Image (cartoon, rainbow, N blue to C red):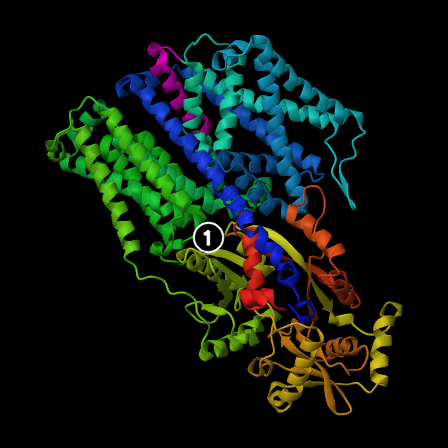
Amino acid sequence: MTAAAEELPMAAAPRVETRKRSGTVSHALALIKDYAPSAIGVALFLLAAWVLHRTFRHITYAELSDEIDALAGWRVLAAIGFTALSFAALAGYEICALRFVGKPLSMAKASLVAFIAQSIAHSTGFAAFVGGGLRYRIYAAEGLDLADVARVQLFFSSTFTLGVMVLSGLALVLEPKMAAAAVALPLVVWQGIGAALLAAVLAYLLLTASGRFDGLRIGRHQVSLPAPGLTALQILLAAVDLGAAGAALYVLLPDLGISMPAFIGLFTAAIIVGVLSHVPGALGVLESLLLLMLQPAPRALPAVIGGLVMFRAVYYLLPLMLGALTLGALEWRHSSGPLRRIIGVGWRTVSPLAPRLYAILAFVAGMVLLFSGALPAEQDRLDVLGDLLPDPLIELSHFAGGLIGVALLLLARSLDQRVREAWFAAVWLIAAGAFVSLLKGFDYEEAIFLGVLLAALIPSRDEFYRTSSLLNERLTWGWTLAIGSTLLATFWLILFAYRHVEYSHELWWQFELEGNAPRALRAMLGGCVVLATFGLTRLLRPAARRPGLPSARDIDEAEAIAARGTSNTDWLATTGDKALLFNPARDAFVMYGAIGRTWVAMAQPVGPVAAWPELIWRFHDEANRHGARTVFYEVQGRALPQVLALGLATMKLGESARVDLGDFNLEGRHRANLRHGHNRAKKEGAVFEVLPPALVPAVIDQLKAVSDAWLAEHDTREKRFSLGFFDPAYVARTPVAVVRRDGGIKAFANLWLAGDKSSCSPDLMRFAADAPKSAMDFLMVEAMLWAKAEGYRQFDLGMAPLAGLPGHRLAPLWSKFARLVYRHGGGLYNFEGLRAFKDKFDPVWEPVYLLYPRGTLARVLTDITALIAGGWAGVVRK
């Protein structure tokens, strides 16, 4: 970023007191926003666990197992058919959404994306993250911008809402008795609520058919409702989706004396609460709510719970397995004809999501091994194994299954972080888990499931490129809670399955073929030992050191790397005010500032592009180890997709101006103003010269005098972090362009030069009060002509803050506020004037982004302000 953009808006002093007064309230609101959804989800999960625990007191494991085994085959097949119909409707969502934004894609590709995304979203509970994140990564390559992706996501949400309203309305109108039994209101009231929901949907449909809605217009942007036909299809698809999902469960349940429409209404209500809970897959929440609303008779309870368990397998687990298989098949690169094109497109579509998917699958595999080890083995299979294998091998296999299960739970986080060693470990552990599943009880179903996961995981090796140690991966609270909940659920399953077995210390030492309970206890203990060992290893590690400023040797090495680099901002590493994180080969680094619990990387890593991914993740790891937020400031170009892999939120800061030097000159009518200013400065005696670094120390006093006068004239102080500042050692590291008059230096700019001659950029641009008029135009024009003569391809004028931010209806609140500041904040900072100055040179404008943890924007912007100002004291003083 150049000095022409030095006074970043967030660093402006007049806003300090307002921030201080509102800081406490903003911080409190931010905490509520960050933690309230998680707290609600945990509360609902605990409530669901309590309801299920009370319900399961009335049945035994043998009764539940018998009911699952007794389920008629036609019921299971019907449930699978309804599940397929629900996912077909979800594919229709995708196709209609793309048509709505005016960017239709092939049905095959849209359906593929919808299936993989929704099969994961159903199991994780993070539908917005999976849907929005995946679509952004996919559709950006298809010509959709952020606004288009937001409209697609909004279309999905509105379609789901319409389906909820239609099905709930129909259920209340046709079958109000179930709702009245849950909440004692007159039937006519419930029917009125249902009629109101249906009327609202009808009004929405009529509104789209009227053609009079032009949307909310903001500037040049406009958002419109879908066409009437698309709206009707939207409603139909949503009703089919939710209705088919409810029907899949209905056919698995015994006769409870409730009609299918009424049941689908109850199911829809439970789904809504499950979605709001953010519990992965609404696990436990959905089941507990349905049990509370259905109130089955005690004799029907085992059959109802058996149906709920089978529904989990059919509607959640089976699509998740098929999604994993689809992902693995897309790696098959050697197909021919149209199939190869579909596979190639599909793999490029879903590969950015692969680590998250495989992390979920590894975690599910660990859960399966633990839950299987907690439940009794099939006695017939166990008897056959006893005739073929020695008892110690069966005992050892059962114990190993528990250890492998816990290990996979711990590895899932590292898979999510793309660690290569985690991939290798997961492959071997899943293969070993499938093997011991056969040995411990001939659980071939479990072995097949693990084999499918292994087949999906093996082709994805290239997606796991990080070389970080497994012990360096920090478990977040979310992962810790998930692991703890899984272990507690395993312990509860042991208590549930063996409630008829009286506990005694001798159980731990019983080794016999029929000893299911002792084997389950030992496997559980082994898993807890693995978990405790992992926790102690991390607890006893030496504390990570806080980042410090670089040494003189570090700065010299950074200068050598920057001199070979491809970005002008690489030279900011030589200011000495930022920490430097080198890779092991010390041929690349990340420069960053740390303030409080915020670590801010400046732009992209410096050095060979091949070293960027690991450096980005290593910086993220280091920040996590210190409990700090990972932030990347002024990211653009090819670094953006790699930083997005961290799962950070994005915000556009402004636009950077780059001038193509190949055809730059002062000829033509569009260059008249530049030509006039340039000639005027020459007539006033201005002379341009570029001083090599070796000659800079001889004139450093003159340069300092110009700099001090410029600071005094503008009543400001030196900034830091994203800007260079006047320091003799720093200024003398690069060439300096100067404007002389009568032998004295009147203006200057130190030049950042890319090592591959891709671009040249001015950093500090300062002039004295007695400089020639139009001195800065003269300086810039001459610097561009010099760079062109030296073979540089572009001239980087730096960022125009807040320029080019979207202001349409779907834009975030920050963007709308920033546009107001950009247009009307001239008294605070001349945003439009800066943009106009750079526009004179006919640049190409490129977007520049801030990437930050979700829900922390206010705090992050405040901390960046302090970094640029040189500390909190600098925020108050100019």
- Few, some or many residues within 10 Å of mark 1 (<14, 14–19, 20+): few
Residue labelled with disc 1: 462
Q: Position of residue 627 (x, y in %)?
A: 42, 55
- Looking at the rendered structure, the kind of residue marked 1 is Asp
Q: Residue at x 26, y 25 (%)?
A: 496
Q: In this view, does 873 lie to the left or right of 223?
A: left
Q: Residue at x 37, y 19 (%)?
A: 305
Q: Can residue 682 be seen in this view?
A: yes
Residue 567 in sight: no
Magenta-drawn stretch contains 715:
no
- Position of residue 812 relative to residue 274, above or below, is below
Image height check: is 74 above or below 24?
above
Q: Residue furthest right?
A: 669
Q: Is residue 704 left or right of residue 585?
A: right
Q: Is residue 167 above or below residue 216?
A: above
Quadrant in the picture for residue 602: bottom right
Image point (42%, 60%), residue name: 622
Q: Nearer the viewer, residue 258 or 119?
A: 258
312 inside magenta stretch: yes
The quarter of the image holding the N terminus is: bottom right
Q: Main secondary structure of the magenta part?
A: helix
Q: Where does the magenta region start and end?
A: 296-317
> Residue 579's spot in the image, x, y percent?
48, 69
Residue at 64%, 14% in the rendered image:
195
Quadrant assignment for the C terminus: bottom right
Work out whether 807 lies above or below 286: below
Secondary structure beneath label 1? helix
